Every structure is written in C-alpha cells, then in structure tokens.
Amino acid sequence: MNLASVQKVLKLTPIIGADMIETATVLGWEVVVKKGEYKVGDLCAYIQIDTVVPELPEYDFLRERKYRVRTIRLRKQISQGLIVPLPSGKWKEGDDITDVLGIKKYEKPDSNPERYEKPRMPKKWYKKWYYIFKYNFLFKLFPMLQKKSRSPFPKHLVSITDEERIQNIPQVLEQYKGKLFVVSYKLDGSSITIIHSKVLGKSKFRICSRRFELHDKKNDWYRVFKDTGFDNEVLKLVNHFSTNDIIVQGEAIGKFNGNHHNLQREQIRLFNIYVSGKRLNQKEFLKVCLANNIPHCPLYKEVTLNHTLPEILKESEIKDILNPVADVEGLVWRCIDDNMSFKVINNNYLVKEQ
C-alpha cells in the first residue's frame, strides 16, 4: 500500500461527547477529522500510520511527535492515519501521492542500518584504541579498505517480508468469504531471511534483515542465527526436499530487540519457506515444519473467514501467547489453499507501544 494516496471518504460517524470532531472512514481505516471539513464521497489525501511527514508549517501539530503519524486515541475513539487536503492537480481515487507530499516510512531506531553498519565498541581498553584507529581514522582516509557491511535486500530471489494490513484491503473479506484460513500470532521482533546454497560442496548461508543483506558477521542477526543453531534447521529442509535451493523467513525474537515476549533465550520462528524459488502454501508449510520439528510462529486457530472488518479487528485484541501479561502485536491470516494473507494489528498494542 502506498504511504500516501488519494482516497474517498466512505462514511462520517459522530463521536459521542465531541462537538468539534468526527470520524471519517477511508478504505478500512477510521480517522478523526474536524467536523464539517469533509463530506461523504469527497476525495482526500490519506497518509498511512507509521509514516513521517515533512517538517512543514501545516504539520506543526505533529512536532512533539517528531512528525510521526501513528495510532492515537481521541475521546475513546481510535484514529489511524491522517487526512489532509489534496495537493493541486488532477487526481483520481487510488493515485499514489507519497512523493508529492514528501512522506517517508517510519523506521524504528533499532532497525536503523547504523545498528549493524559498524561493530559495537569493545570493552577492553587495548581493543578500544584499535577500534577508534580503524573506524575513525584508517577507514576515513582509505575507504577502499573497509569491507562492504551490507547491500540491498535481494528482491530478485525472495520478496521482502511485509504482510498487508487488512484495513488497506477490506475487499478481501468478501472475496475470500467462506475460505479456510490458518491464523497465527504475529511476533514482535526483527525479520530475518536465511538463504541457503552450496558453494564448492559446502553449505553457504546468506543472512538478511528486513531491508538489507548483511555481509559483516558482527551483527545481531548473524549472532542469533548462530546462537540458535538455526543452520541445522535449514539443513533439515535441504535434506527433506533434496535440494540446496532453500530460503526461509521468520522472526528473530528476544532480548536484542526489546524482548516483548519476555524470553530467557533468543529464538527464530519461521513463517515462510521457499523451495527452488516457490513459496510453500500454508498447508505445506505447517506439514513440513511439524514433520521436521522446525520452530514456527505459534498458531492461534483455523477458521472459516466470515468476519466483518470490526469483528476481525476486535478478534486481534488478545494477549500474547509467549508472554500472557502483554498484548499480542496482532494476528496473521493465511488462506490454507493459496498464498493470500494479511495482518491484523492489535489496536491496544499500537496505542501502548506508541
């Protein structure tokens, strides 16, 4: 989904006890707006949550939030996103205006590339001096000596992991009505992609974060991969399918990323397996994981899709299976027959987290 797009106001709903504001519905999102500013059927510019707007006077009301658009609660009403007037020009519903408005994707501080661009400062004093010399002097004078620590995510091999939010595609609730879905808990960690191949008869593992392939092994993703012994889990799949062309995607969870699940040890839980470039459907995925005892994201239930949007949002407002005192981040719905999927983020989690 585009970070900012032209959308139609589908519905306006009063807010109990509020005289100056009301709720506007665009796509499947509810956004608090000034009363009387929009009419049903009006086209508007809709800016997604988890974005950053430019530091312009019209967005001064977001200054204290560092210009981040996020989920908030006003008068007990959830508001997700921002509705602003359309920029000048001829527009139609669905047009992408992300670049026109200068909207950027919000990235958590701990997913910043600088986190694994350079190794942590060593603790021993004699190693500190070498570290300072190498990174603050030698590599600045002779940058060609520094090995490339990362490169763009290899999209030619596998898709970046990012399920679409149900509010952006509410039409699938009707399109897939009556279909069987497997619903799993969405884990709160860092996305990890592991690509296996064989070079000169030896297994080679390439490790990727959500946005980059990582070449320097002194980072959290490589450390968790090694500490969990997940190379052995991937090799199980190599043997199971009798091919070296295996790619797995999952969530790395634990202390290095906030430890929302209150784990004693870090873990990797899978949610995707690719064999020779083809992604397994949910039925095949679960069968292979169970047969080989490979950890995957916890299952919530199997259910026939017969939900309205409010019902499916309400169902996600549950506690985390790994840490029952915390709210679950959300649920991921995957059709058991094909690769259609979407995520439903728990609004209670969003309000508390942000």
Image: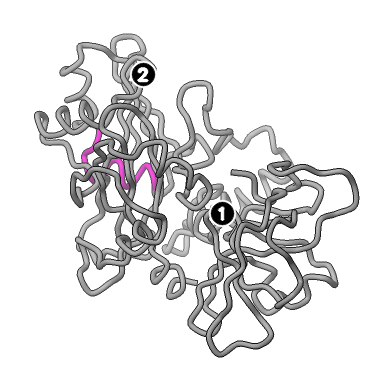
Image coords of residue 206 (percent x, y): 40, 29
State the quadrant of the N terminus.
Answer: top right
Image-based side of 134 in relation to 249, left or right:
right
Residue 305: name its quadrant.
top left
Q: In this view, does 343 lie above or below 353?
A: above
**Label drawn at residue 260:** none
- Give me the residue at 24% from left, 43% from top: 304
Type of residue at label 1? Asn
Q: Which of 9 and 230 is in front in this view?
A: 9
Amino acid type assigned to the residue bearing label 2 in the image = Lys
* Residue under pointer 1: 112
Up the image or down, 254 lies above or below 333; here it is: below
| Side (left or right) of 224 relative to 299 | right
Residue pointed to by mark 2: 278
Residue at 58 percent across and 78 percent down: it is 14
**Which residue occupies 74% across, 67% down?**
38
Labels 2 and 1 touching (C-beta < 8 A) = no
Out of 318 and 152, give the one closest to the viewer: 318
What span is colored magenta in the figure?
221-231
